[in-house]
């Protein structure tokens, strides 16, 4: 068995049929335990996932990425022996060596949560417009500042069991990234950031969030902040 | 400077709206208020139909020129309340739908994955475990 039997990769997937099987098989070379949450895809994502060795959890209806992550975490937490939980993108932009690095830090008990950042070291290339927007988001967010984060919207995160059991993502859509950061800031968990490489392939570019969606995220967040009290 | 009254009234309406939005309300409590507001609406409605000139009088007392204008102003406030109410209702429904879908997904997934992968990975089917969080 592998060194990573206690690690679970949580991959939310929505209409990723063309790439999901490759991404999963690739990740499974290192991480045997993977749960893919098919967020009510209308394509053949599920069939593709079933050809792999990953666990498949299907939302009966499309709920959004935040909901899919929470479902994946809930599922993984139930699996015997699960200690570390990584959220991983379905489009192949994340790399397993980064996850290994992050898990190693958690094993050394350096933190409870490790977030990937595209900006600590400029390793890969991030399209400049994306860089400006993401940096602005990180700087504007009071909670991201509190934790000294450079990148509040990175999909690659690794949580230990304590943290994963505490997380409750309620923003079903894309605002969950900021929600998670806000949660971490107030949770008292130890949060650290490490540089990760993001592969901006043609596919991930076409699937990635459009920047205009940032407006939606800001709106969702501001509503939540007010409605939370 | 009689408009001060209508101004105060409308601002109060907006203020309550904001308050409702900011504070997490107790459902039973607000439901009672909503019902009272509805009852008041019905009474005012019937009264206004029979004695429209009184609406004019009330409007004048509040500093509004015509009864119709007063009704319009109140309509705007009522409309805002309705919108907010619907929005909150949708949000709570969405949360319930999510919990429901998640429970189904995890439950079904556990069974299906145990069947599909369980034997291969030597992982026992965790059917006795309770779903929910």
Image: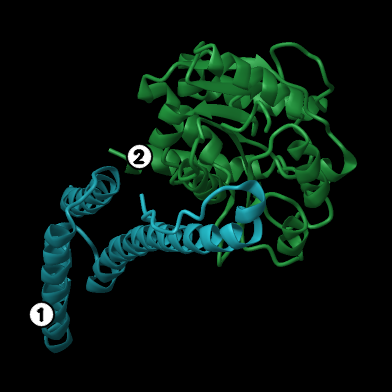
**Foreground residue, B106 or B56?**
B106
Do the CB atoms of the residues marked 2 and 1 lie less than 8 Å apart?
no
Label 2 – label 1 distance at C-alpha:
35 Å
Looking at the rendered structure, the secondary structure element under dot 2 is: helix
- The chain letter of the cyan chain reads B
Q: Quadrant of the N terminus of chain A?
A: top right
- Quickly name the residue at label 1: B43
On screen, residue A30 versus residue A162, left or right, reads right
Graded by Cα atoms within 10 Å as few (under 14), some (14 to 19) or many (20 or more), the crowding at tag 1 reads few
Q: Is residue B88 above or below residue A227?
A: below
Q: Is residue B112 above or below residue A8?
A: below
Mark 2 chain: A
On screen, residue A60 versus residue B42, left or right, reads right
Q: Position of residue A47 (x, y in %)?
A: 75, 64
- The chain letter of the green chain reads A
One can see residue A162 in this view: yes
Same chain, labels 2 and 1: no
**Foreground residue, A119 or B35?**
A119
One can see residue A58 in this view: no
- Quickly name the residue at label 2: A226
Q: Position of residue A59 (x, y in %)?
A: 56, 61
User: What residue occupies the far bottom of the structure in this picture?
Assistant: B50
Q: Position of residue A79 (x, y in %)?
A: 50, 44
Going 75% across and 23% down the picture, which residue do you hit? A97
């Amino acid at each position: 068995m592998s060194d990573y039997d206690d690690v679970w990769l949580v991959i939310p997937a929505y209409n990723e049929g063309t790439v999901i099987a490759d991404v999963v098989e690739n990740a499974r070379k290192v991480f045997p335990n993977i749960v893919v949450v098919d967020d009510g895809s209308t394509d053949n994502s599920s069939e593709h996932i079933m050809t792999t060795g990953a666990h498949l959890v299907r939302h009966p209806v499309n709920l959004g990425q935040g909901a899919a992550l929470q479902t994946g975490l809930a599922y993984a937490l139930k699996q015997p022996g699960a200690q570390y939980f990584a959220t991983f993108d379905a489009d192949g932009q994340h790399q397993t060596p980064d996850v290994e690095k992050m898990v190693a830090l958690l094993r050394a008990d350096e933190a409870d949560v490790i977030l990937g950042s595209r900006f600590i070291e400029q390793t890969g290339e991030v399209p400049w417009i994306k860089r400006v927007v993401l940096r602005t988001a990180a700087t504007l967010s009071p909670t991201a500042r509190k934790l000294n984060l450079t990148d509040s919207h990175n999909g690659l995160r690794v949580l230990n069991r304590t943290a994963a059991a505490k997380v409750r993502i309620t923003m079903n859509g894309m605002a969950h990234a900021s929600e998670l950061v806000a949660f971490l800031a107030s949770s008292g968990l130890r949060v650290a950031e490490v540089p990760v490489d993001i592969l901006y392939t043609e596919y991930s570019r076409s699937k990635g969030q459009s920047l205009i969606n940032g407006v939606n995220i800001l709106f969702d967040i501001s509503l939540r902040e007010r409605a939370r009290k | 400077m009689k408009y001060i009254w209508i101004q105060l009234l409308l601002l109060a309406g907006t203020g309550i709206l904001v308050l409702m939005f900011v504070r997490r309300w107790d459902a039973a409590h607000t439901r009672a208020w909503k019902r009272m507001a509805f009852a008041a609406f019905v009474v005012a409605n019937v009264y206004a139909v029979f004695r429209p000139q009184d609406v004019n009088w009330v409007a004048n007392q509040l500093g509004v020129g015509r009864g119709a204008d007063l009704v319009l102003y109140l309509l705007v406030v009522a409309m805002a309340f309705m919108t907010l109410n619907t929005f909150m209702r949708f949000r709570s429904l969405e949360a319930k739908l999510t919990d429901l879908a998640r429970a189904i997904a995890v439950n079904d997934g556990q069974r299906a994955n145990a069947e599909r992968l369980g034997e291969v990975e030597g992982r026992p089917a965790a059917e006795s475990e309770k779903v929910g969080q």
